[in-house]
Image: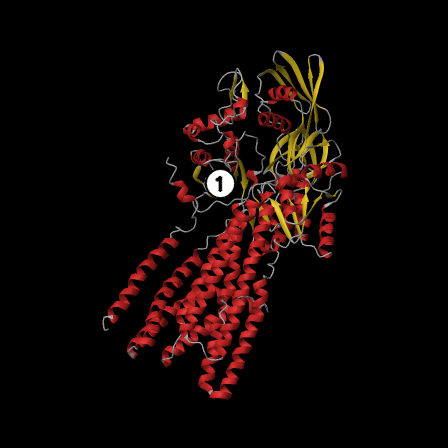
Amino acid sequence: MEPSPGSMPTSDPPDTAPRAGVSRCPHCGTRVEGAVDAFCCAGCEMAFAIIRGSGLERYYQEREAFAPRPEPLAGGWDALPVEPDEHGLCEIRMAIDGLRCASCVWVAENVLQRTAGVDEAMVSYATGRATLRWDPDKVRLGELAGRIAALGYRPRLLGEEARPDRDLLLRLGVAAFAAANVMMYAAALYAGWLGGMEVRFVALFQWMSLILATPVAIWCAAPFFAGAWAGLRNGVLHMDVPIAMAVAVLYVQGVAGTLLHVDTYLDSMTMLVALLLAGRVLESRGRRRAAEAAVTLAATVPAMARRFAGGTVEAVPSVQLVPGDRVVAGAGEELPADGVVADGEGALRMALLTGEAAPVQVGPGDRVWAGTLVVDGALTVEVTEAAEETVIHRMAEELRAAADRGARPSSTDRIAPWFTGATLLIAVGTFFVWWIVSGLGAALAASVAVLVVACPCALALSRPLAAAAGLGAAARRGLLFRSADALLELGGVDVVALDKTGTVTAGALDVIGAGDDDLRVAAGLERYSVHPVALAIVREAADRGIPLPAATDVQEEVGIGISGRVDGTDWSLRSAGAGVVVLRGADGYRGLIRLGDSVRADSADAVAGLRRLGTQVAILTGDHPEVAARMALSAGIDRVEARLDPEAKAAWIRARRDEGHRVLYAGDGLNDGPALAASDVGVAMGTGAASSILTADGVLASGSLRPLAVGIEASRACRTAIRWNQGRSVVYNISAVTAAALGWINPLVAAVLMPLSSALVIWGSSRVEAAVRRAEERTV
Amino acid sequence: MNSIAFLVPIAVGLAAIFLFLFLRAVKGGQFDDLDDPPRRILKDD
């Protein structure tokens, strides 16, 4: 939902004031020569018709930005394995890109809602994510996704929705309720020490505290006990262990103290649990958004294939194809299986596998892969591998397996064993010293006090709170992290390696060289075409503010080019090899239009931002060194490693790591999987055609590299906050444990000291967002 | 001071009512999404 005030109908800059006879396409706002309200293309006319047909014309008055120009949607949606529930309805979640304002969300939601067969459609105003329930007998998912695409928005499939943390919230509610009440009794008891209190009231308050603290210790703190137990069973002493120990000691002391009429620390225990649960809730909320960004790969192979059998063509499910079958696929279709071209010529878009945007020309004998899109021509393919044997399917499986890589131990978890060990040791030492000096009773009291005040609260809170703030700060700027660990790792990065296609560059076919006049004529001819070259030419004309001229007698010959009349003369546009089209007029050659992958507009800025943070930036690409060097130059990158295959990229990264560097890798292709896994922090592009997202630690949601630098700043701010918090907590614990060992601690001192140390931690964490904002101001 | 015997249960009871309401709201899904509903009410249809 990026606002784009520049494209508001009312904010036309004066220098582009309408020339005579120039109007704007009512749907997407592209300038068009000729009559008012002429559509720029068939797609926009269709979108307008859908919106009108759904009775949602209000959208055109209320929207704050023009809609994007509709482009055809790659197929494969119907191949998704979705199971109907007991009501016969299917449910799926998708992200919708290109929603620019609240009205866009409204129109997308209502168009879906008013489509026959849709039970419920909800599009989030906050995130642009949609939840769709539909009846598979009445409407296909492909049709629904197609309707979104027809409006100009891009649907993308989302992974499993992270479950909301209701359970933690319930526990937090109960713990907070108990803590507030127990603290009230504690305040009364402390007042009683000074003013004197009847024994029966002391007993009443202690028993009430115990009653309220019991569910907290048993139910609310259960996640910590479960975590500690799981850790101990695996031989790991992580942060849950000292927490569980503290809660257990405090509660057992509380039961014993209540029965024996000794002071208890139950107020500290309930508050400890409530604060720690609050930290958990915050952390899990911060993580949820990133988890949702995981995209599945299922929507890549079409459900049905057209199989040649005995001179006729029959439709069969793709999964039923066997090696030796012959299948046909025309322009706009995706190949259903891996194979070899038997007959026909055509251009294939293989971005999914290679990350390269430009279509590849194939002919008889060439190897082709399932999931690639036929852009041009028609192919007959002899199947060599089908269904689960296809490359795309195997890659998806590998990615899924790699996505389950284990969590790294955090710095707090590394402290935990020392903390636990030291506390236990001091407690035992205290017990023996006091036993020898003044007997068993005093020894027990002092050693329990040591265990009580050696509160891991501040230590345990320092990370989740700072991480939640950091995850939130990064997420608001378009960088979503799967875990707090990956975010914290990011701050130590000193080498940033970038994939070229789709990462530094946009990964789409763009016009990279053309004269305005040539472009105007070409755009007129290509207005109604949905060929990728046509879409690129019209997009470029619209970006330059060139009004699209009217064209007549337009003839499109698949695989060859397009011709027609513009301004009363005949023109033709022909492909002339890779990335070049030639425009000819009635009197012959007129000009060239070059197409290619262009560097993202903000890549140079992003690289400059990374440099300012003291990181080295390098491009890793499988491309030709010359091409790569040109790209690198325009993006401001001086280090280029060209002609690297996926394994070589991973090897390069491992070599840098062996030299002691910390490496961040950002890439978007399936082929980036090994490099993403080899790096310290792997970041995938949210707009990537394929889903490297599963192997990555983080996702750049908007498809811009800019949030990387902010993310590093956020991570550094987090690391600083956590170091400070841990430092404070260590100072607190050393002084408090010393005091306890000397017998100076009583419940009142503990009740003051423990929340004080937690408050310091909360204050330290709250400065993360402010630090990120300051860093952002410096870089803008 | 004997009033304490009444006041303590009353205080716990009052707090318990709010706890009950909170737990019901959580179970009802009111805390699942804190971003979208506040924007949704601004758009009437």
Amino acid on which disc 1 is placed: Gly
**Do we see residue A322 in this rendering?**
no
| Callout 1: SS | loop
Question: What residue do we see at 45% from left, 31% from top?
Answer: A63
One can see residue A26 in this view: yes
**Above/below status of A773 relative to A277:** above
Residue A340, percent from left and from top = 72, 36
Relative height, residue A732 to residue A147 (above, below): below
- For this view, does A318 lie left or right of residue A423? right
Residue at figure coordinates x 67%, y 45% from the top left: A498
Give the chain of mark 1.
Answer: A
Frontmost residue, A114 versus A238: A238
Residue A538 screen position, x and y as percent: 60, 25
Quadrant containing the C terminus of chain A in the rendered view: top right
Question: Disc 1 marks which residue?
Answer: A128
The residue located at (35%, 55%) in the rendering is B24
Q: Is residue A633 above or below residue A48?
A: below
What residue do we see at 52% from left, 26% from top? A13
Instruction: Identify the coloring.
Output: secondary structure
The residue lying toward the viewer, choosing from A750 and A87, is A750
